[in-house]
Image (cartoon, rainbow, N blue to C red):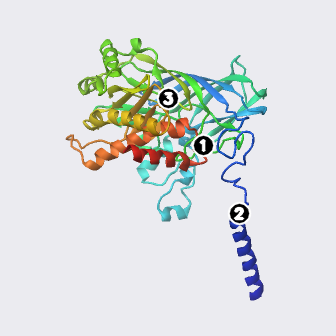
Amino acid sequence: MLTRLILYIIVIINFITSQNSDKFKQLDQEIATPNLYRTASGYPGHGYWQNRADYTIDVKINDDEQSIEGFETITYKNNSPDNLNYLWVQLDQNVRAKDSDSYKISTGSMQRKLDFTWIKPGYVIGDKEANEILNKFDGGFNIEEVVTIDGRKLNYVINKTMMRIDLIKPMKPGSKMSISIRWNYNIQDRIFMGGRPGYEFFKSDSNYLYTICQWFPRMAMYNDVYGWQNKQFLGRGEFTLDFGDYDVRITVPSDHIVAATGELQNSMEVLTSAQIKRLKQARASDEPVIIITQGEAEKNEKSRSKKFKTWRYKAKNVRDFAFTSSRKFIWDAMGIRLGSRTIMAMSYYPKEANPLYERYSTRAVAHTVRVYSKYTFDYPYPVAISVEANNGMEYPMICFNYGRPEKDGTYSERIKYGMISVIIHEVGHNYFPMIVNSDERQWTWMDEGLNSYLQFLTE
Ligand SMILES: [Zn+2]
């Protein structure tokens, strides 16, 4: 009996080691086998393709209830050689739905985990009061309609953070189609619940600062290796998306300031003549120029307009779109000369982040764009924005960062250099993965690794 057991063990060990030491093993699990789309050298093959998703979006923030409503039209181009019978769309915000799996995988003390009673919808480990608030909150998408461009309803299935849209007839290779989606959801208290999208409420002046990201139904990636990348979003992992052009109209209270991916199209309608004049000066300046001073921002904080304004932003060839909105923003900017182009480095921050942000943020953005451009390729976008939002997360052209001094305005070296580091890191993510579009939901280390290396060079 014992000898037979030993024999079994030897056979199993032999099997395991032979599996791992085969020098001729395909790297198929790690790297796709070379084919006409992907060569062994790492270059795209002669048959390489990417699908494309262009968006026009109308979105409105309701500042009284902290909710958001949107209507979007996605124009999807199938450049693949395959017929597509259905499309997959990411609904990341469903990570805040009551039945979200994110609650089931949240970690806490071992004792609480062992009794398993916490595994029910909307229940997370934490103190009782927090759990009660979280149990009541539903931040998931409410999808109102999914229709074709000529108004025909499309069937769809929502599976947690993913939505499959069934097409009336398959999308042929090389074809294009437009789909419109109407939706709304409740915005979460990001400071209390965590996560990237949401708001921060400032008790001292009763204002909200919104960071709106991973916020609209986004076309999932279809590629030659996996087909649809339709893995669930669990809150920590990130994403991959196809490139596209965005035309986004953002409606907010008329006393809010909005910063977003892309270039502002209607400055005459939303900015004052003084702000427009200062922006022009900033473009020609090698030093940050203040567009909205702290004094002006503090005055804005006291305003409570019931009117609305629509800010229109356009962005070309980006794989996502994010924005921020608040009455609290101080705003500064400067021009970065890169070859024959001028890129606007800009920062938006509440007074709580001053004097740190006014001193270092825009300079850190400009330095990052210059150093990354030197070591990789020229920054291709027209703007690079740092927003202080007590957070650290990147989106194309805009990122959310942290670093606030003490109440009296003093700060330690740790806070200062931590703040500069996070700005360099998040602005640097424009390169990896926003331009070099690796699949973050599958391989988080790819963009983080390359970006951290360049971050340290830049520091
Ligand atoms: Zn990172």
- Residue drawn at 71 percent across, 63 percent down: 23
Per the model, the C-alpha gap separating discs 1 and 2 is 27 Å
Q: Examine the rendered structure and indicate whether residue 221 appears above or below residue 150.
A: below
Residue 129: x percent and y percent? Answer: 41, 49
Residue 140: x percent and y percent? Answer: 55, 37
Q: Earlier in the sequence, mark 2 or mark 3?
A: 2
Query: Which amino acid type is marked by label 2?
Result: Lys
Disc 1 marks which residue? 439
The residue nearer to you, when weighing 163 against 9, is 9
- Residue drawn at 45 percent across, 17 percent down: 310
- Nearest to the eye among marks 3 and 1: give it: 3
Residue 85: numbered disc: none
- Residue drawn at 72 percent across, 49 percent down: 33
Per the model, the C-alpha gap separating discs 2 and 3 is 41 Å
- Mark 1, other Cα within 10 Å: few <14 / some 14–19 / many ≥20: some
Q: Earlier in the sequence, mark 1 or mark 2?
A: 2
Q: Are marks 2 and 3 in contact (CB under 8 Å)?
A: no
Q: Can I make out residue 48 in this image?
A: yes
Query: Which amino acid type is marked by label 1?
Result: Asp
Residue 356: x percent and y percent? Answer: 27, 38
Spot the residue most to the bottom: 2
Disc 2 marks which residue? 23
Residue 396: x percent and y percent? Answer: 49, 32
Disc 3 marks which residue? 380
Query: Which amino acid type is marked by label 3?
Result: Pro
Q: Are marks 3 and 1 in contact (CB under 8 Å)?
A: no
- Nearest to the eye among marks 2 and 3: give it: 2
The residue nearer to you, when weighing 170 against 315, is 315
Q: Label 3 CB, ligand 1: below 8 Å?
A: no
Callout 1 secondary element: loop
